[in-house]
């Protein structure tokens, strides 16, 4: 059922006129349905002519930097065309805000399911071998992404890979401090060990691995699995993509990977979970298939927990000020605390 309100964000007559200029089918836009997901961006699936499309644009009245992420995401999807990385096929992108009021792009629908959105389908729920392969399939997607030379696909000027690792602690510490604007938030002291983790990361920073493309938010809720196999049908939500050290994506996968109960960081949850690989098995699988040096990989896991914990705490800060649901803020705060505790436990093991 279509969620009320998308019509204000997507003028279908103007969209059809623009699609005419791109030679993307012809005729009226039919069967428009707003898709749901873990993002505030608007996703609209519709049919025109003989083909189905998914439109993605920023929400109404979004800040300029939010709108800019749509253009960045479209550029990455265009660069991935023809590669072995599973991703949604990009049809066309429009950066002219006069058309719909914000940048947008059109992509092909992904036929698949999100393992974190609801219980696994019967095929996947009843087969431990399929569940095991699902995790390894995600690692395969990371391996294929890490093999791409950004220069070769037109992303040589995308992001700032020089000094990428060296900037991380300051960048995310500044993000945490910025939450002080939210009245009612108790401040950075509400997260245990922030300063200690930051100091450890600065003191133990490794030499970066070969520059590559990062997804930036690689976890179970940002992949679609094939409905009839264990393979990843597409990695989605590329709005945080950049160029830098791809090992941080693997660290992010480990930091968000569910525990024995199927509960991962934030709102990630998979049922049933018993057949899935452990995080250690994912890392071993990656190590055996990649030329990258993983001798300092634990550092990337600590960094991922540091960064993700700070991002989740932003949800808590906004909820304290009444700008987001209180229950979600509490859940994200608890997850942030857990991530910082895990970071410190790993640091202690490495001492």
Image (cartoon, grey):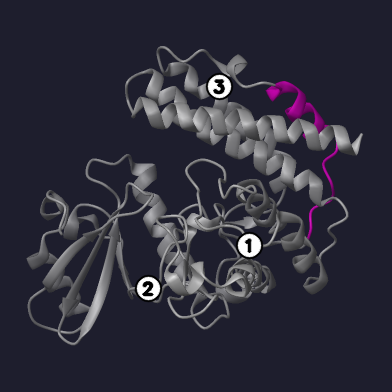
Work out which quarter of the rendered image holds the N terminus and state it: bottom left
Whether residue 317 is visible:
yes
What residue would you read off at disc 1? 276
The x and y percentages for residue 327 are: 38, 28
- Callout 1 secondary element: loop
The part of the image, by quadrant, that contains residue 27 is bottom left
Is 50 displayed left or right of 265 in the figure?
A: left
What residue would you read off at disc 2? 110
**What is the C-alpha distance between the residues marked 1 and 3?**
37 Å
Is 53 displayed left or right of 210 in the figure?
A: left
- As drawn, 344 above or below 126: above
- Callout 3 secondary element: helix
Whether residue 202 is visible:
no
Please report whichever mark, 1 or 3, sits nearer to the chain's N-terminal start. Answer: 3
Q: Which residue occupies 69% across, 47% down?
A: 164
Q: State how many labels appear.
A: 3
Crowding at mark 1 (Cα within 10 Å: few <14, some 14-19, many 20+)? many
The x and y percentages for residue 119 are: 43, 58
Chain part drawn in magenta: 193-209
Crowding at mark 2 (Cα within 10 Å: few <14, some 14-19, many 20+)? some
Q: Which label was assigned to residue 177?
A: 3
Is 163 displayed left or right of 141 in the figure?
A: right
């Amino acid at each position: 059922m279509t969620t009320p309100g998308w019509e204000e964000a997507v003028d279908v007559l103007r969209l059809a006129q623009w699609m005419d200029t791109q030679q993307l089918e012809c005729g009226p836009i039919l069967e428009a349905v707003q898709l749901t997901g873990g993002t505030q961006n608007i996703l609209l699936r519709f049919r025109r002519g003989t083909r189905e499309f998914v439109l993605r644009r920023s929400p109404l009245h979004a800040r300029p930097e939010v709108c800019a992420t749509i253009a960045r995401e479209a550029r990455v999807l265009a660069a991935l065309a023809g590669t072995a990385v599973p991703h949604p096929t990009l049809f066309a992108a429009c950066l002219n805000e006069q058309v719909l009021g914000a940048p947008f792009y059109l992509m092909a629908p992904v036929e698949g399911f999100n393992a974190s959105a609801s219980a696994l389908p019967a095929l996947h729920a009843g087969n431990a071998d399929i569940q095991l392969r699902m995790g390894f399939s995600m690692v395969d997607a990371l391996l294929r992404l890490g093999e791409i030379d950004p220069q070769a696909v037109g992303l040589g000027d995308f992001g700032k890979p020089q000094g990428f690792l060296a900037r991380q602690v300051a960048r995310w510490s500044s993000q945490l401090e910025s939450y002080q604007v939210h009245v009612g938030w108790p401040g950075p002291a509400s997260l245990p060990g922030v300063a200690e983790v930051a100091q450890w990361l600065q003191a133990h920073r490794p030499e970066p691995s070969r520059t590559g493309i990062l997804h930036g938010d690689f976890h179970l809720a940002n992949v679609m699995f094939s409905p009839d196999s264990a393979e990843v049908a597409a990695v989605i939500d590329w709005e945080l993509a950049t160029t830098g050290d791809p090992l941080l994506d693997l660290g992010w996968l480990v930091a968000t990977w569910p525990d024995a109960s199927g509960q991962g960081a934030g709102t990630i949850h998979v049922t049933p979970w018993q057949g899935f690989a452990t995080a250690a098995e994912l890392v071993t699988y990656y190590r055996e298939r990649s030329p990258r040096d993983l001798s300092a990989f634990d550092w990337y896991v600590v960094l991922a927990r540091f960064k993700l914990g700070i991002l989740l705490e932003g949800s808590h800060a906004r909820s304290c000020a009444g700008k987001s649901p209180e229950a979600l803020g509490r859940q994200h705060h608890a997850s942030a605390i857990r991530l910082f505790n895990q970071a410190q436990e790993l640091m202690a093991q490495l001492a």
